[in-house]
Image: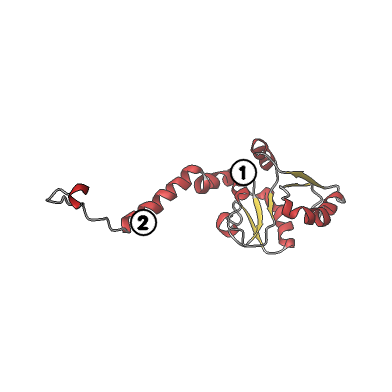
Amino acid sequence: ARLNKPLKIAAKVDAADRVYWETVIEPLVRDNPLVEFVGEIGDADKSAFLGGAEALLFPIDWPEPFGLVMIEAMACGTPVVAFACGSTPEIIEDGVTGFLVSTMGEAVAATARAFELNREDIRSRFDLRFSATAMARRYLDVYGGILARRPFAAPMRVLEEAKTFAALA
């Protein structure tokens, strides 16, 4: 509302959150003509939804271990505005792929500046850091490093006398 721009909220409301949604959030959405709740977005529509957004607002203020939607937005070239907590500082390159903020006022200001970021650069940074190829390369690097430090077992030696289960009886 502070930017006088439409805000679309895409989310799944789980059974555990239904009462909170209905008593706290839904009245705020219903009473604001600029806010629209679109519900859960399926994979077929997600790219168009995220790619058509000026920015993805990621208002999580707890230590989220990894917000997949952030890299989904970056894959579409869409900048991400998020609070600097949890994994967001590791995912978002401040001023390049989005903005890291500490307050709601900073979030509003950053959202107004989202157009300044180059969407092609955001997509390129996604490809470099989070594409399947990039992630597989990093997994191979990690596994290679582990194997390089791990001592290998001594080769098996052949026993001189043949042993069978029958011989043990």
Tell me the number on the disc at residue 159: none
The residue depicted at 84 percent of the width and 54 percent of the height is: 28
Residues at marks 2 and 1 touching, judged by CB atoms closer than 8 Å: no
The residue depicted at 28 percent of the width and 58 percent of the height is: 151
Q: Nearer the viewer, mark 2 or mark 1?
A: 2
The percent position of residue 38, horizontal first and vertical second, equals 76, 43
Q: Nearer the viewer, residue 38 or 115?
A: 38
Which amino acid type is shown beneath numbered disc 1? Gly
The percent position of residue 108, horizontal first and vertical second, equals 74, 57
Looking at the rendered structure, the number of numbered marks drawn on it comes to 2
Label 1 SS:
loop
| Direction top: furthest residue | 44
Q: Is residue 125 visible?
A: yes
Crowd around label 2: few <14 · some 14–19 · many ≥20 (10 Å): few
Tell me the number on the disc at residue 77: 1
| Direction front: furthest residue | 169
Task: List the residue tagged with mark 2.
Answer: 146
The percent position of residue 166, horizontal first and vertical second, equals 20, 47
The residue depicted at 73 percent of the width and 49 percent of the height is: 13
Crowd around label 1: few <14 · some 14–19 · many ≥20 (10 Å): many
The percent position of residue 120, horizontal first and vertical second, equals 59, 42
Q: Is residue 127 above or below residue 88?
A: above
